[in-house]
Amino acid sequence: FTVINSEPQTAPLAAAVRCVSSGSVDITVPLNFWAGKRRTSLEKRNRENVYEPATGRVLCHLEPCGAVEVDQAVESAKSAFSHWSKMSGMERARIMIETAHIIESRREEIAEIEVVNNGKSITEARLDVDSARLCIEYYAGLASTMAGQHVQLPGGSFAYTRREPLGVCVGIGAWNYPFQIAAWKSAPALACGNSMVFKPSPVTPATAVLLAELYAKAGAPEGLFNVVQGGQETGSLLCHHPDVAKVSFTGSVPTGKKIMEMASKGVKPVTLELGGKSPLLIFQDSEVENAVRGALMANFLSQGQVCSNGTRVFVQRDILPEFLEEVVKRTQAIEIGDPLLEHTRMGALVSRAHLEKVLSFVDQAKKEGATVLCGGEPFVPSDPKLRGGYYMTPCVLGDCTDEMTCVKEEIFGPVMSVLSFETEEEVLQRANDTTMGLAAGVFTSDVRRAHRVVAHLKAGSCFINNYNITPVEVPFGGFKMSGIGRENGQVTIEYYSQLKTVFVEMGDVDSLF
Ligand SMILES: NC(=O)c1ccc[n+]([C@@H]2O[C@H](COP(=O)([O-])OP(=O)(O)OC[C@H]3O[C@@H](n4cnc5c(N)ncnc54)[C@H](O)[C@@H]3O)[C@@H](O)[C@H]2O)c1
Ligand SMILES: C[N+](C)(C)CCCC=O
């Protein structure tokens, strides 16, 4: 992609060829993309530093797009739409499949840039790139299945429905899964015949533009997938733009409310993928080994910065000591450090400010009576180049109660709150006692209990005997304040298309006048 200036690695390269190392990357190329090219922003005044979480170094500068650039990007998307929307699903699929092939061949480069910009481990970043590719492949498969219905009416007349694209769609992303979010939004949008302008989080601007380059390289018409950089002002310009037909947003609940309000001015549909404070219920008949693994997956992926995390871990009282012993042992064994190293399992949090916020939640928990069973401290790696990075030790909080701040609020960091319970009825009531409803999980060996419990859980994604897996074939999205609409799965076609009904009269007009 020629996006980086990277010092050559001095150590001999191992089997998996490493192109970059932490602390060696400067991104100097423009990060916007429209009308088929990378573009610089015109506005230089609001230039912001973007940091490498692993080291705390400045990685690049963000120059937010203003009204002129947003207009150009939307214009470019409009022009691509007029061509792309007339292509058949099979033709669109071919370009999407080609994009997926290129992503596969560039998996390592994309994952490395994601790590450098986001701080997550390379192992996880590779899985995120895979999820992005699979999503594009999946919707390529669905592109040609978009079809309407034929409805017979009296006298040989009939009606039919056409499933049509919406137009220029806007995607606005969060910083925790930058490349994956761009793919999860663009794949269904493009499959349905829409074009897109995507705005990544200003904290993680580096990889969405790679996706734009790859769609273009695969043969997408100029302007099909565009990237504009910026924060809330750029986002607001996009949401208010009269030529934008839909906004798909991933981020926090407060921002989601603003997006909905802005979109309502133009009566534009929204998809909102928002925050969570999800419960994980572990019954005494569970396989404790699996339940512990599930609890770790529910809390520590991506340094705990995952919307669907099951951060309220309810454990039935009889197995609480056994569960806690094992979960603490495994949490303490998580290898923290350079996210580009193969053996690292937990990298750096996304920013200094966010690290401090997460640590202050741990302090607050202590003040409110929770017991820190492990972690919850800043972590300084021994490698001198990582000393300015944003690391902390993953934390397990015991003796938690429902009214504590750590149990009520989304921390968005590696902090697990463990609570105990006695009965199924009681834990269901407590699990559902939240304004959010993104995900929930249950561990039990009793199949009837498992289904009975998930039927009562008020959450968009429920996991039985596992947690935080998101196959792209399956819809993902929240109940209550965790969002509106779904991403992934067949149903998402409905969120990026509209139905047109056509009446066909085969006889004479039966006029009343
Ligand atoms: N449900 C999901 O799929 C999902 C996935 C990832 C993250 N999240 C949630 O995202 C949050 C963390 O991400 P974040 O800190 O980037 O969220 P955020 O709400 O601060 O920002 C998200 C995006 O919105 C943009 N934005 C901010 N104000 C805006 C405005 N007024 N108009 C238009 N755009 C605006 C930001 O620049 C960014 O691109 C957490 O709450 C997390 O749970 C949800
Ligand atoms: C792939 N995960 C880990 C389930 C994350 C989904 C997207 C939410 O942040």
Image: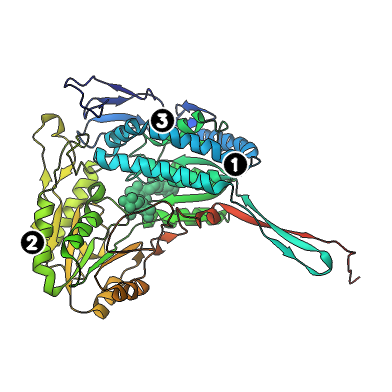
Mark 3 or 1, nearer chain start:
3
Question: Quadrant of residue 48 in the image?
Answer: top left
Q: Seen in the image, is 99 located left or right of residue 292?
A: right
- Give residue 17's position: percent from left, percent from top: 26, 26
401 relative to 223 in the view: left or right: left
Tell me if residue 490 comes above or below residue 183 in the rendering.
below
> Residue 447 at x, y = what percent?
30, 73
Q: Which residue is mark 3?
A: 31
Task: Give me the residue at 32% from left, 32% from top.
Answer: 108
Helix, strand or loop status at disc 1 = helix
Q: Circle 2 is placed at which residue position?
A: 325
Q: Which residue is mark 1?
A: 90
Looking at the image, residue 335 lies above or below residue 47: below
Residue 135 position in % (x across, y down):
44, 46
Question: For the residues marked 2 and 3, what is the alpha-carbon distance in whole angstroms?
Answer: 47 Å
Q: Which of label 1 and label 2 is nearer to you?
A: 1
Q: Position of residue 367 (x, y in %)?
A: 11, 62
Position of the N terminus, as image quadrant, is top left
Residue at the spot x=34%, y=45% of the render? 177
Type of the residue with mark 2: Glu
Q: Nearer the viewer, residue 443 or 86?
A: 443
